[in-house]
Amino acid sequence: MTVQINSNYLENYSKEYAQIICDRFFSDRKFISGQEIIQLTNSTQVNFFIIKRLFELWQEELGKLKSNPFFDYRDISVHEALTQFMNVLSRRIKVERSHFEPLVKEAVSQAIHLACYPVDFYQSEIQKAPSGKINEYLKENRKYYKWHDRAIIFLIDKAGFGQDKESYTKAIAANYQVIRENLESENLLLATLGDVRPFDTDQYKGTESTSSFEKEEKPNPEPILNSIPLEEEPAPVQEEQVLEEVKAAVEEAAKPVFHSPAAKGNLDSKALKSHFSAQSYKGMKGILGELSDSLALNQRFMFTKELFDGNADLLKHALKSIDQAGSFDSAIDLINSRYVSELDWETDSEAVREFLMLVYRKYPD
Protein backbone atom coordinates (compact mmCIF):
# COMPACT_ATOMS: atom_id res chain seq x y z
CA MET A 1 0.00 0.00 0.00
CA THR A 2 1.27 3.49 -0.90
CA VAL A 3 -0.14 6.64 0.68
CA GLN A 4 0.24 10.00 -1.06
CA ILE A 5 1.15 12.88 1.24
CA ASN A 6 2.60 16.37 1.01
CA SER A 7 6.06 15.56 2.32
CA ASN A 8 7.24 19.19 2.27
CA TYR A 9 4.39 20.27 4.54
CA LEU A 10 4.93 17.32 6.88
CA GLU A 11 8.67 18.00 7.08
CA ASN A 12 8.24 21.70 7.81
CA TYR A 13 5.41 21.17 10.29
CA SER A 14 7.27 18.48 12.26
CA LYS A 15 10.43 20.58 12.33
CA GLU A 16 8.62 23.71 13.54
CA TYR A 17 6.63 21.74 16.12
CA ALA A 18 9.80 20.18 17.54
CA GLN A 19 11.53 23.56 17.66
CA ILE A 20 8.65 25.22 19.51
CA ILE A 21 8.41 22.39 22.05
CA CYS A 22 12.15 22.41 22.68
CA ASP A 23 12.24 26.21 22.95
CA ARG A 24 9.61 25.96 25.66
CA PHE A 25 11.15 23.10 27.61
CA PHE A 26 14.85 23.87 27.36
CA SER A 27 14.51 27.60 28.07
CA ASP A 28 15.66 26.97 31.64
CA ARG A 29 16.84 23.34 31.56
CA LYS A 30 19.72 21.49 29.95
CA PHE A 31 18.34 17.94 30.04
CA ILE A 32 15.00 16.16 29.84
CA SER A 33 14.15 12.99 31.78
CA GLY A 34 11.91 10.07 30.90
CA GLN A 35 9.09 11.20 33.18
CA GLU A 36 9.23 14.67 31.70
CA ILE A 37 8.94 13.20 28.20
CA ILE A 38 5.72 11.41 29.15
CA GLN A 39 4.19 14.77 30.10
CA LEU A 40 5.90 16.83 27.38
CA THR A 41 3.02 17.66 25.01
CA ASN A 42 -0.77 17.48 24.96
CA SER A 43 -0.44 14.73 22.36
CA THR A 44 0.29 11.61 24.38
CA GLN A 45 0.92 9.71 21.15
CA VAL A 46 3.82 12.04 20.33
CA ASN A 47 5.21 11.58 23.83
CA PHE A 48 5.05 7.80 23.62
CA PHE A 49 6.58 7.68 20.16
CA ILE A 50 9.57 9.55 21.60
CA ILE A 51 9.83 6.94 24.35
CA LYS A 52 9.44 4.17 21.75
CA ARG A 53 12.39 5.49 19.77
CA LEU A 54 14.48 5.73 22.92
CA PHE A 55 13.62 2.11 23.68
CA GLU A 56 14.72 1.10 20.17
CA LEU A 57 18.03 2.89 20.70
CA TRP A 58 18.30 1.14 24.08
CA GLN A 59 17.89 -2.21 22.32
CA GLU A 60 20.49 -1.28 19.74
CA GLU A 61 22.99 -0.51 22.51
CA LEU A 62 22.28 -3.87 24.11
CA GLY A 63 22.74 -5.56 20.74
CA LYS A 64 26.14 -3.93 20.29
CA LEU A 65 27.19 -5.07 23.75
CA LYS A 66 26.12 -8.65 23.09
CA SER A 67 27.93 -8.74 19.76
CA ASN A 68 31.27 -8.92 21.58
CA PRO A 69 32.63 -12.41 20.68
CA PHE A 70 34.74 -12.92 23.79
CA PHE A 71 32.02 -13.38 26.41
CA ASP A 72 29.12 -15.76 26.86
CA TYR A 73 26.03 -13.58 27.02
CA ARG A 74 23.81 -16.66 26.88
CA ASP A 75 24.88 -17.67 30.37
CA ILE A 76 21.85 -17.31 32.65
CA SER A 77 23.67 -15.29 35.33
CA VAL A 78 25.10 -12.91 32.72
CA HIS A 79 21.70 -12.58 31.09
CA GLU A 80 20.01 -11.74 34.40
CA ALA A 81 22.70 -9.24 35.39
CA LEU A 82 22.60 -7.60 31.97
CA THR A 83 18.81 -7.35 32.02
CA GLN A 84 18.90 -5.73 35.45
CA PHE A 85 21.56 -3.28 34.29
CA MET A 86 19.58 -2.28 31.20
CA ASN A 87 16.41 -1.90 33.25
CA VAL A 88 18.17 0.47 35.65
CA LEU A 89 19.64 2.37 32.71
CA SER A 90 16.22 2.74 31.09
CA ARG A 91 15.04 4.62 34.19
CA ARG A 92 17.90 7.08 33.91
CA ILE A 93 16.99 8.85 30.68
CA LYS A 94 18.85 12.15 30.32
CA VAL A 95 18.81 13.85 26.91
CA GLU A 96 20.21 17.19 25.76
CA ARG A 97 18.28 19.37 23.32
CA SER A 98 20.60 18.73 20.35
CA HIS A 99 19.83 15.00 20.57
CA PHE A 100 16.23 15.36 21.67
CA GLU A 101 14.82 17.72 19.03
CA PRO A 102 15.23 15.20 16.14
CA LEU A 103 13.37 12.63 18.26
CA VAL A 104 10.43 15.00 18.69
CA LYS A 105 10.35 15.76 14.97
CA GLU A 106 10.29 12.06 14.08
CA ALA A 107 7.60 11.32 16.69
CA VAL A 108 5.34 14.10 15.37
CA SER A 109 5.66 12.80 11.82
CA GLN A 110 4.81 9.26 12.96
CA ALA A 111 1.82 10.42 15.01
CA ILE A 112 0.39 12.30 12.02
CA HIS A 113 0.89 9.24 9.82
CA LEU A 114 -0.92 7.08 12.36
CA ALA A 115 -3.81 9.53 12.82
CA CYS A 116 -4.49 9.86 9.10
CA TYR A 117 -3.50 6.44 7.75
CA PRO A 118 -3.73 3.83 10.53
CA VAL A 119 -3.73 0.81 8.20
CA ASP A 120 -0.59 1.96 6.42
CA PHE A 121 1.13 2.81 9.70
CA TYR A 122 0.41 -0.49 11.42
CA GLN A 123 1.24 -2.50 8.33
CA SER A 124 4.61 -0.76 8.29
CA GLU A 125 5.04 -1.73 11.96
CA ILE A 126 4.46 -5.36 11.01
CA GLN A 127 7.24 -5.10 8.44
CA LYS A 128 9.65 -4.00 11.19
CA ALA A 129 9.02 -7.17 13.21
CA PRO A 130 11.64 -9.94 13.09
CA SER A 131 10.49 -12.87 10.98
CA GLY A 132 8.61 -15.42 13.05
CA LYS A 133 8.32 -13.06 16.04
CA ILE A 134 5.53 -10.71 15.02
CA ASN A 135 3.44 -11.42 18.11
CA GLU A 136 6.40 -10.77 20.41
CA TYR A 137 7.06 -7.49 18.61
CA LEU A 138 3.44 -6.36 18.97
CA LYS A 139 3.34 -7.32 22.66
CA GLU A 140 6.51 -5.34 23.28
CA ASN A 141 5.27 -2.26 21.45
CA ARG A 142 1.54 -2.20 22.21
CA LYS A 143 2.11 0.14 25.17
CA TYR A 144 3.34 2.79 22.74
CA TYR A 145 0.25 2.69 20.51
CA LYS A 146 -2.23 5.27 21.84
CA TRP A 147 -4.18 6.13 18.69
CA HIS A 148 -6.31 3.75 16.62
CA ASP A 149 -4.91 0.84 18.63
CA ARG A 150 -8.08 -1.20 18.01
CA ALA A 151 -6.80 -1.67 14.47
CA ILE A 152 -4.02 -3.92 15.71
CA ILE A 153 -4.17 -5.03 19.36
CA PHE A 154 -6.84 -7.64 18.59
CA LEU A 155 -4.09 -9.53 16.70
CA ILE A 156 -1.96 -10.05 19.79
CA ASP A 157 -2.22 -13.66 20.97
CA LYS A 158 -4.73 -14.31 18.21
CA ALA A 159 -4.61 -17.96 17.22
CA GLY A 160 -4.64 -18.83 13.55
CA PHE A 161 -2.55 -16.05 12.08
CA GLY A 162 0.73 -17.88 12.49
CA GLN A 163 3.91 -15.88 11.99
CA ASP A 164 3.22 -14.80 8.41
CA LYS A 165 3.54 -11.04 7.78
CA GLU A 166 1.17 -11.18 4.83
CA SER A 167 -1.58 -12.68 6.99
CA TYR A 168 -1.11 -9.96 9.59
CA THR A 169 -1.20 -7.12 7.06
CA LYS A 170 -4.36 -8.51 5.45
CA ALA A 171 -5.98 -8.91 8.86
CA ILE A 172 -5.23 -5.28 9.78
CA ALA A 173 -6.82 -4.04 6.57
CA ALA A 174 -9.88 -6.25 7.05
CA ASN A 175 -10.29 -5.24 10.68
CA TYR A 176 -10.10 -1.56 9.77
CA GLN A 177 -13.01 -1.91 7.34
CA VAL A 178 -15.16 -3.23 10.20
CA ILE A 179 -14.23 -0.70 12.89
CA ARG A 180 -13.39 2.42 10.88
CA GLU A 181 -16.65 4.21 11.69
CA ASN A 182 -15.96 3.86 15.41
CA LEU A 183 -12.36 5.04 15.43
CA GLU A 184 -11.52 8.50 16.70
CA SER A 185 -11.64 11.19 14.04
CA GLU A 186 -8.24 12.13 12.64
CA ASN A 187 -9.18 15.81 13.13
CA LEU A 188 -9.82 15.25 16.81
CA LEU A 189 -6.56 13.38 17.30
CA LEU A 190 -4.56 15.98 15.42
CA ALA A 191 -6.25 18.74 17.42
CA THR A 192 -4.02 17.69 20.33
CA LEU A 193 -1.13 19.20 18.35
CA GLY A 194 -2.94 22.52 18.01
CA ASP A 195 -1.73 24.14 21.23
CA VAL A 196 1.74 24.17 19.68
CA ARG A 197 0.86 24.78 16.03
CA PRO A 198 -2.43 24.05 14.19
CA PHE A 199 -2.17 21.20 11.71
CA ASP A 200 -3.75 21.61 8.26
CA THR A 201 -5.01 18.18 7.19
CA ASP A 202 -6.05 19.39 3.75
CA GLN A 203 -2.59 20.75 3.02
CA TYR A 204 -0.99 17.55 4.30
CA LYS A 205 -3.13 15.49 1.92
CA GLY A 206 -2.75 17.97 -0.94
CA THR A 207 -1.58 17.07 -4.43
CA GLU A 208 1.34 19.46 -4.72
CA SER A 209 4.85 18.33 -3.78
CA THR A 210 3.58 14.88 -2.91
CA SER A 211 5.59 11.82 -2.02
CA SER A 212 4.71 8.48 -0.50
CA PHE A 213 4.91 6.41 2.64
CA GLU A 214 6.19 3.19 1.12
CA LYS A 215 6.90 0.07 3.09
CA GLU A 216 10.14 -1.48 1.89
CA GLU A 217 11.07 -4.98 2.81
CA LYS A 218 14.20 -4.62 4.92
CA PRO A 219 16.43 -7.31 6.39
CA ASN A 220 14.95 -8.32 9.70
CA PRO A 221 17.27 -7.71 12.65
CA GLU A 222 18.29 -10.58 14.89
CA PRO A 223 16.35 -10.75 18.16
CA ILE A 224 18.07 -8.65 20.83
CA LEU A 225 17.34 -10.89 23.80
CA ASN A 226 17.22 -14.64 23.94
CA SER A 227 13.61 -15.77 24.19
CA ILE A 228 11.77 -18.97 24.85
CA PRO A 229 11.48 -20.91 21.58
CA LEU A 230 8.12 -20.57 19.89
CA GLU A 231 5.82 -23.50 19.72
CA GLU A 232 5.34 -25.08 16.35
CA GLU A 233 3.42 -22.67 14.13
CA PRO A 234 -0.15 -23.57 13.22
CA ALA A 235 -0.97 -24.38 9.65
CA PRO A 236 -1.63 -21.32 7.49
CA VAL A 237 -5.25 -20.34 7.15
CA GLN A 238 -6.99 -19.24 4.00
CA GLU A 239 -7.50 -15.51 3.49
CA GLU A 240 -11.29 -15.94 3.63
CA GLN A 241 -11.00 -17.53 7.06
CA VAL A 242 -8.83 -14.67 8.29
CA LEU A 243 -11.29 -12.05 7.12
CA GLU A 244 -14.28 -13.84 8.68
CA GLU A 245 -12.48 -14.26 11.99
CA VAL A 246 -11.54 -10.60 12.05
CA LYS A 247 -15.09 -9.52 11.30
CA ALA A 248 -16.58 -11.74 13.98
CA ALA A 249 -14.03 -10.60 16.57
CA VAL A 250 -14.83 -6.89 16.29
CA GLU A 251 -18.39 -6.72 14.94
CA GLU A 252 -20.04 -6.28 18.32
CA ALA A 253 -17.64 -3.56 19.45
CA ALA A 254 -18.31 -1.58 16.28
CA LYS A 255 -21.98 -0.89 17.01
CA PRO A 256 -22.82 2.79 17.64
CA VAL A 257 -24.30 3.84 20.97
CA PHE A 258 -25.32 7.41 20.40
CA HIS A 259 -29.10 7.16 20.73
CA SER A 260 -31.28 6.83 23.77
CA PRO A 261 -33.88 4.04 23.39
CA ALA A 262 -36.45 6.17 25.22
CA ALA A 263 -35.92 9.36 23.26
CA LYS A 264 -35.01 8.74 19.66
CA GLY A 265 -32.86 11.54 18.30
CA ASN A 266 -31.73 12.77 21.71
CA LEU A 267 -28.30 12.02 23.09
CA ASP A 268 -27.98 9.60 25.99
CA SER A 269 -25.28 10.88 28.34
CA LYS A 270 -24.82 7.56 30.15
CA ALA A 271 -24.40 5.59 26.92
CA LEU A 272 -22.04 8.22 25.55
CA LYS A 273 -19.96 8.26 28.71
CA SER A 274 -19.69 4.47 28.70
CA HIS A 275 -18.78 4.46 25.02
CA PHE A 276 -16.12 7.14 25.25
CA SER A 277 -14.54 5.76 28.44
CA ALA A 278 -14.20 2.31 26.84
CA GLN A 279 -13.35 3.22 23.26
CA SER A 280 -12.01 6.75 22.98
CA TYR A 281 -9.23 9.00 24.13
CA LYS A 282 -6.85 6.34 25.30
CA GLY A 283 -3.75 8.27 26.19
CA MET A 284 -5.31 11.65 25.35
CA LYS A 285 -5.34 14.39 27.95
CA GLY A 286 -8.48 16.17 29.04
CA ILE A 287 -9.21 19.77 28.12
CA LEU A 288 -8.27 21.99 31.06
CA GLY A 289 -8.95 25.39 29.49
CA GLU A 290 -11.83 26.66 27.41
CA LEU A 291 -13.27 24.46 24.68
CA SER A 292 -12.92 27.23 22.13
CA ASP A 293 -9.14 27.25 22.57
CA SER A 294 -8.92 23.51 21.89
CA LEU A 295 -10.48 23.56 18.41
CA ALA A 296 -8.33 23.03 15.36
CA LEU A 297 -9.07 25.32 12.41
CA ASN A 298 -10.74 22.56 10.41
CA GLN A 299 -12.89 21.60 13.41
CA ARG A 300 -14.06 25.17 13.90
CA PHE A 301 -15.04 25.36 10.24
CA MET A 302 -16.83 21.98 10.29
CA PHE A 303 -18.80 22.69 13.48
CA THR A 304 -19.82 26.15 12.29
CA LYS A 305 -20.97 24.90 8.91
CA GLU A 306 -22.57 21.56 9.82
CA LEU A 307 -23.87 22.05 13.36
CA PHE A 308 -24.50 25.78 13.86
CA ASP A 309 -26.01 26.88 10.54
CA GLY A 310 -22.87 28.75 9.53
CA ASN A 311 -23.13 31.03 12.57
CA ALA A 312 -19.70 31.32 14.21
CA ASP A 313 -21.12 33.40 17.09
CA LEU A 314 -23.60 30.62 17.88
CA LEU A 315 -20.79 28.10 18.07
CA LYS A 316 -18.83 30.44 20.34
CA HIS A 317 -21.84 30.85 22.64
CA ALA A 318 -22.45 27.07 22.72
CA LEU A 319 -18.85 26.33 23.68
CA LYS A 320 -18.96 28.94 26.44
CA SER A 321 -22.21 27.48 27.80
CA ILE A 322 -20.74 23.96 27.80
CA ASP A 323 -17.65 25.26 29.62
CA GLN A 324 -19.99 26.46 32.37
CA ALA A 325 -22.11 23.28 32.50
CA GLY A 326 -19.99 21.71 35.23
CA SER A 327 -20.39 18.06 34.24
CA PHE A 328 -20.77 15.80 31.22
CA ASP A 329 -24.41 14.96 32.05
CA SER A 330 -25.32 18.65 32.35
CA ALA A 331 -23.50 19.44 29.12
CA ILE A 332 -25.42 16.74 27.22
CA ASP A 333 -28.72 17.98 28.70
CA LEU A 334 -27.81 21.45 27.48
CA ILE A 335 -26.95 20.19 24.00
CA ASN A 336 -30.20 18.20 23.78
CA SER A 337 -32.38 21.11 24.87
CA ARG A 338 -30.76 23.88 22.85
CA TYR A 339 -29.18 22.37 19.76
CA VAL A 340 -30.14 18.79 18.85
CA SER A 341 -33.79 19.59 18.13
CA GLU A 342 -33.64 23.29 17.30
CA LEU A 343 -30.79 22.88 14.80
CA ASP A 344 -31.94 19.45 13.60
CA TRP A 345 -28.67 17.66 14.31
CA GLU A 346 -28.09 14.24 12.77
CA THR A 347 -26.79 12.66 15.95
CA ASP A 348 -24.96 9.83 14.15
CA SER A 349 -22.99 12.22 11.93
CA GLU A 350 -19.24 12.58 12.11
CA ALA A 351 -19.53 16.25 13.07
CA VAL A 352 -21.76 15.49 16.08
CA ARG A 353 -19.56 12.58 17.15
CA GLU A 354 -16.46 14.74 16.99
CA PHE A 355 -18.15 17.56 18.89
CA LEU A 356 -19.25 15.17 21.64
CA MET A 357 -15.76 13.75 21.94
CA LEU A 358 -14.50 17.23 22.73
CA VAL A 359 -17.21 17.63 25.36
CA TYR A 360 -16.16 14.30 26.89
CA ARG A 361 -12.56 15.45 27.06
CA LYS A 362 -13.78 18.52 28.91
CA TYR A 363 -15.67 16.35 31.45
CA PRO A 364 -14.06 12.86 31.41
CA ASP A 365 -15.10 11.89 34.96
Image (cartoon, helix red, strand yellow):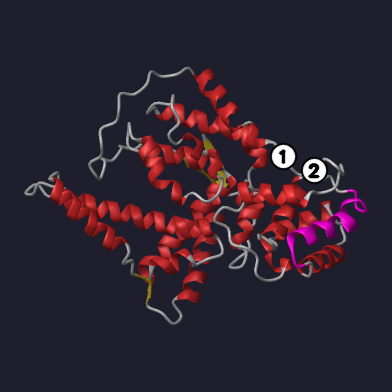
Could you tell me which residue is drawn at 41 percent across and 61 percent down?
103
Question: Residue 50 at x, y = what percent?
Answer: 43, 59
Give residue 206's position: percent from left, percent from top. Answer: 63, 48
Compute the Cα span from label 1 to label 2: 8 Å
Asked whether residue 356 is in view, the answer is yes
Determine the residue positioned at 19% across, 54% down.
82
Q: Residue visible at 32% across and 33% down?
A: 131
In screen coordinates, is 107 left or right of 222?
Answer: right
Q: Amino acid at mark 2?
A: His
Callout 1–callout 2 Cβ contact below 8 Å:
yes
Q: Secondary structure at mark 1?
A: loop
Q: Nearer the viewer, residue 262 or 56?
A: 262
- For label 1, the crowd category at 10 Å Cα-Cα, with few meaning under 14, some 14 to 19 and many 20 or more, is few
Pointer 2 local density, CA inside 10 Å: few below 14, some 14–19, many at least 20: some
Q: Which residue is drawn at the image coordinates 30% and 23% (left, top)? A: 232
The residue labelled by disc 1 is 256
Numbered disc total? 2
Q: Label 2: which residue? A: 259
Residue 216's image quarter?
Answer: top left
Q: Which residues are magenta?
A: 326-344
Label 1 sits on what residue type? Pro
Of 310 and 49, which appears nearest the observer? 49
- In front of the other: 16 or 208: 16
